[in-house]
């Protein structure tokens, strides 16, 4: 990598390496080679089989880290582009962001700044395992700029997250005699219906209402067998403490299902800098697990409305703007 990165080519290359959560290894390997060849000191640390976080530094302690995640949601699809956009899984969440951060670090190095580092984490899309296990790579930074698709606005706050798994047990019998069995699927459906009716109270004045998504429902083995097992995964974007939301969920379930917590993080108030538009973000990030890395900022190109979709894309102009913004933020933070 020269001091000037081909931003669009790098974005396409990153997209073309599948890295669905749990399969981040090939992308980490690529980045390790790429950044080492560029003169960065690269360290990795495993967080699971063939899954690692990556830290890349120059020869000065970093005042600021530029940080985003390695993983994407499924399904993977490769890159293509037109005159205005680059498309593909991860285009805006978060491989375009990653490319812009690398380009920003290269540009800062070209002007003599060597106090900016890069941190890339596994598992943000599910349980933030990379962020939760990142402390072993902590270089003592004072600030961390986390990249998520914010349309290049600084996040002034973002919602908390609660993700739970519900499991129900039943008794399997032939479906011709349902009265002799116990349907785990019906138990799950009854609990989900009650969760849909939950009152989370008035919206938070800053973060707004708590939102619920039933992301996954599974159960049964055949249409002629009363289901013995069923599970559902439910995610909440919380405008209040996720602990309070969990207590409401447990009350609504009333012991009919087993509940386990997959992810739980508090709403965040974030650091901002003058001169950049800011906005409250409705989604969660790795930030709650990265407090030891310094004061957190949140900014990235692309729209969250395009993330996780079949038409995921990032605007080329926003990628270029993000490089300039990341560099400006690092310069400002170095003087803070």
Image: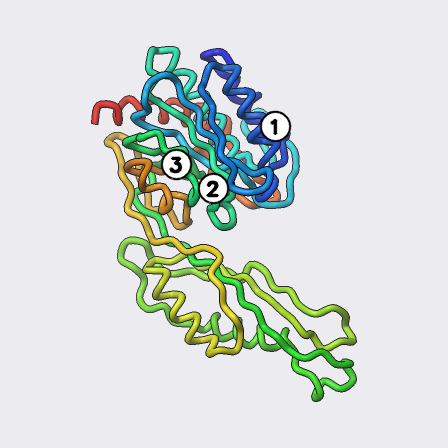
Question: Dot 2: few (<14), some (14–19), or many (≥20) neighbours within 10 Å?
Answer: many
Give the crowd class for mark 3: few <14, some 14-19, many >=20 residues within 10 Å.
many
Mark 3 secondary-structure assignment: strand
Mark 1 or 2: in front is: 2
Coordinates of residue 7 in the picture (x, y in percent): 51, 21
Q: Earlier in the sequence, mark 3 or mark 1?
A: 1
Q: Nearer the viewer, residue 303 or 253?
A: 253
Q: Which residue is mark 3?
A: 146
Identify the mark at residue 81; answer none if there is no mark. 1
Image quarter of residue 215: bottom right
Q: Residue at left 64%, top 29%?
A: 80
Q: Earlier in the sequence, mark 3 or mark 2?
A: 2
Which label was assigned to residue 130? 2
Picture quarter with the C terminus: top left
Q: Are marks 1 and 2 in contact (CB under 8 Å)?
A: no
Q: Nearer the viewer, mark 3 or mark 2?
A: 2
Would residue 202 be visible to someone looking at this image?
yes
């Amino acid at each position: 990598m020269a001091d000037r990165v081909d931003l669009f080519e790098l974005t396409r290359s990153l997209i073309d390496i599948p890295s669905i959560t749990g399969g981040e290894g090939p992308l980490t390997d690529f980045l390790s080679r790429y950044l080492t060849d560029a003169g960065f000191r690269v360290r990795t640390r495993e967080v699971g089989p063939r899954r690692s976080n990556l830290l890349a530094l120059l020869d000065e302690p970093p005042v600021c880290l530029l940080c985003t995640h390695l993983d994407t949601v499924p399904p993977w699809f490769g890159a293509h582009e037109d005159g205005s956009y680059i498309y593909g899984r991860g285009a805006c969440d978060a491989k375009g962001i990653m490319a812009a951060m690398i380009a920003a670090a290269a540009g800062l190095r070209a002007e003599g700044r060597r106090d900016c580092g890069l941190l890339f984490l596994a598992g943000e899309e599910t349980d933030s395992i990379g962020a939760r296990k990142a402390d072993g790579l902590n270089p003592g930074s004072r600030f961390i700029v986390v990249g998520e698709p914010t349309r290049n606005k600084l996040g002034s706050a973002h919602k908390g997250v609660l993700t739970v798994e519900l499991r129900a047990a039943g008794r399997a019998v032939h479906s011709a005699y349902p009265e002799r069995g116990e349907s785990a699927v019906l138990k799950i459906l009854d609990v989900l219906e009650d969760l849909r009716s939950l009152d989370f109270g008035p919206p938070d004045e800053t973060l707004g209402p708590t939102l619920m998504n039933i992301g996954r429902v599974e159960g049964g083995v055949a249409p002629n067998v009363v289901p013995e097992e069923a599970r559902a995964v439910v995610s909440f974007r919380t405008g209040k403490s996720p602990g309070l939301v969990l207590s409401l969920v447990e009350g609504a379930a009333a012991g009919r299902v087993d509940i386990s917590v997959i992810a739980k993080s508090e709403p965040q108030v974030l650091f901002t800098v003058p001169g950049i538009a800011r906005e409250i973000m409705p989604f969660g990030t790795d930030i709650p697990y990265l407090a030891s890395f310094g004061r957190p900022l949140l900014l990235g190109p692309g729209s969250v409305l395009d993330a996780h979709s079949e038409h995921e894309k990032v605007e080329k102009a926003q990628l270029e703007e993000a490089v300039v913004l990341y560099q400006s933020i690092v310069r400002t933070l170095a003087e803070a």
